[in-house]
Amino acid sequence: MIIQLEPAISSADKDAILSKVKSLDYKTNEVKTQRGSYVVAIGKKEFDIRQLGNLKGISDIHRVSDDYKLVSRKWKVNRTAIDLGDGVAIGDGSLAIMAGPCSIENEAQVQKTIDHLVKNGVKIMRGGVFKPRSSPYAFRGLGIEGLKMWHTLVRKAGIKIITEVMQVSQIADMIDYVDVFQVGARNSQNFNLLDELGKVDKAVMLKRGISGTIEELLYSAEYVFAAGNEKLILCERGIRTYEKASRNTMDINAIPILKEKTHLPVVADPSHGIGIREYVDSVALAALMAGADGIIYETHQEPEKAASDGQQTLDFEESERLINKMRKAFELLHSF
Ligand code: PEP
Ligand code: MN
């Protein structure tokens, strides 16, 4: 059960609500986010909800049968949009495109990417400065200095930044330079990181774990929300299966399922989803047709020279073609 509290509730009224709920054999969790205050009550006992009706300070009560509560659509039927400022939003009914290299490499690469994005009206640039790599000898990113360089260049173009945070200690250094924190597939269930991201007032995009279930992704989102941050976006990026013909198996099924289960925006990453440059556009279009609110993909001026993930990275011509196709597909879908 989710009890939404009135913004100006007195502490006496809140205490009265908490003790009443506890007396009904429910465990209470107080949640305060950028948008509201809630009591998430966990328990099994059936009771007449009118027992809470005469308490002061409650603006709404919802029974949520799912085990995750705050991210459930059973509570909030209207979809949540994530506003990044300056007219850029994810999940507001527009098509969100996030494009850029796997890794931020140098100033020239960043500037070329920005020019490509500006030319095509893309408002969110992706790129990694802290890179999770399977091998410790692979390029692991430029770190915080790279993020600062990128931020300086990108701000002049009015473009937003999404980039991966790998550990709690990086959050404070990154926060002034990031618009969306990305939690990578390998950290999808790093609960300490999720808890800490619950304390920041920045959007967070959670990727599905490499072997993670849809439900586990929803629970990860619940962690961040319950810790105080409801600016959340979920990302399907393919899962590990027995199939070897592609890097991962893009789970298109997850998109309509997630959209049904949660009010949060759902985006797709076809680059990691299939891992093969030639097929990125097919998977991107499939994800949009399945209901994704946006697409995040990798592009680089010379993919064959990219410091990471070149095999799944589009060059700028391919990227421009994909952007045009996605816009047409999105329009078509919304005309049905
Ligand atoms: C990335 O976005 O470059 C990345 C490492 O993604 P994932 O965590 O999905 O593997
Ligand atoms: Mn990558």
Image: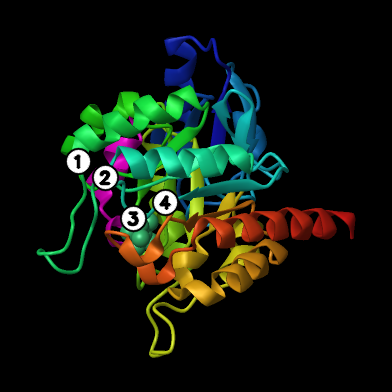
Q: Which part of the image, by quadrant, shows the C terminus?
A: bottom right
Is 312 in front, or is 90? 312
Residue 104 in view here: yes
Tag nearer the camera, 2 or 4:
2
- Is 140 situated left or right of 332 in this image? left
Label ID, residue 129:
2
Q: Which residue is mark 4?
A: 206
Q: Which residue shows up at 27% across the image and 50% down it? A: 191
| x, y percent for residue 291 | 69, 60
- At mark 2, the secondary structure is loop
Instruction: Please give the label number shown on residue 23.
Output: none
- For badge 3, the amino acid type reads Gly
Report, in whole angstroms, how far the alpha carbon at label 4 lies from the one at label 1: 20 Å
Q: Which residues are magenta?
A: 185-200
Viewport quadrant of the N terminus: top right
- Does the beta carbon at disc 2 come under 8 Å from ligand 1? no
Q: Closer to the camera: disc 3 or disc 1? A: 1
Q: Which residue is mark 3?
A: 184
